[in-house]
Image (cartoon, rainbow, N blue to C red):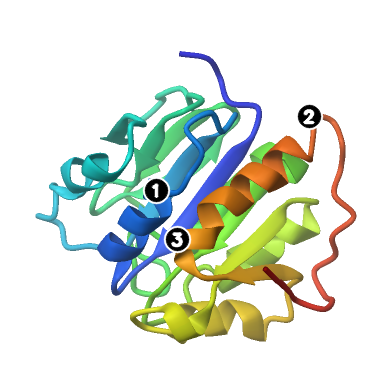
Amino acid sequence: MSAADHLVVVGCSWGGLDALSRLLAHVPQDLPAAIVVAQHRMHDASYLAELLARHTDWPVCEAEDKEPISVGHVHLAPPGYHLLIDGHRLALSTEGPVRHSRPSIDVLFESAAEAFTHRVVGVVLTGANSDGARGLVRIVRRGGRAVVQDPATAARRDMPEAALATGVDATVAPLEEIGPLLGQMITSHPQGERSSSHPQGERSST
């Protein structure tokens, strides 16, 4: 396993299992990045990794504290823990819920923005609250890029709509287009090159 130079962070809630399954099925197998996911779920929902692994050849596993972030791997926030990016490692926290959620998408996104700056892509998928909106703005402010699921294709449109309501400069796409889009974004954005994105601006769509 090699350390990741680029990172994709994904947040979802209601309808997330289906959304993640469809997204991962279309992610290029040679994407030179790691994927880290915060999905709101019940404390006993420990089957997510097994279900998602059916839709991708990438290893899918729940994150462990101090675990290295590895290229070609999908790291999932365990139920009941915040998942943070600490340099090139993962960190787990049992601090209180944020926006009534643990794991919190905002916590993951904000820590990823600080650790990977312009080398991170934040993705907000379906969900029934506003978690992830604030974190997506932080990612763009730090030079990263933002992708939001087209609300018209979401099981619950609250979360993608909340992200877009911030005015963040984001690409809006249906699920099946997000995987290939990630490949285009990362391969066209070599290590060391900063994005010219700004937190406010026109939203683009594929």
Callout in the foreground (3, 1): 1
The residue that disc 1 covers is 24
The amino acid at mark 2 is Gln
Q: Quadrant of residue 115?
A: top right
Q: Residue at x 33, y 39 (%)?
A: 56
Relative vertical location of residue 116 with respect to residue 160 in this rendering, above or below: above
Mark 1, Cα crowd under 10 Å, few <14 / some 14-19 / many 20+, is many
- x, y percent for residue 102: 33, 60
Q: Residue furthest top?
A: 1
User: Mark 1 is on which residue type?
Assistant: Leu
Local secondary structure at mark 3: strand
Residue marked by disc 3: 11
Marks 3 and 2, how far apart in space?
24 Å
Sequence-wise first label, 3 or 1: 3
Disc 1 on helix, strand or loop? helix
Q: Secondary structure at mark 2?
A: loop
User: Would residue 182 be found to the left or right of residue 50 on screen?
Assistant: right
Q: Are marks 3 and 1 in contact (CB under 8 Å)?
A: no
Relative horizontal placement of residue 189, taking residue 116 as reference (left or right):
right
> 61 or 43: nearer the eye?
61
Identity of the residue furthest to the right in this view: 196
Left or right for 52, reference 103: left
Pointer 2: what residue? 191
- Would you place residue 160 above or below residue 113 in this image? below
Type of amino acid under label 3: Gly
Answer few, some or many: residues within 10 Å of disc 2's Cα (few below 14, many 20 plus, some between 14 and 19): few
Point 47% across, 72% down: residue? 131
> Can residue 110 be seen?
no
Looking at marks 1 and 2 on the same chain, the residue that comes earlier in the sequence is marked by 1
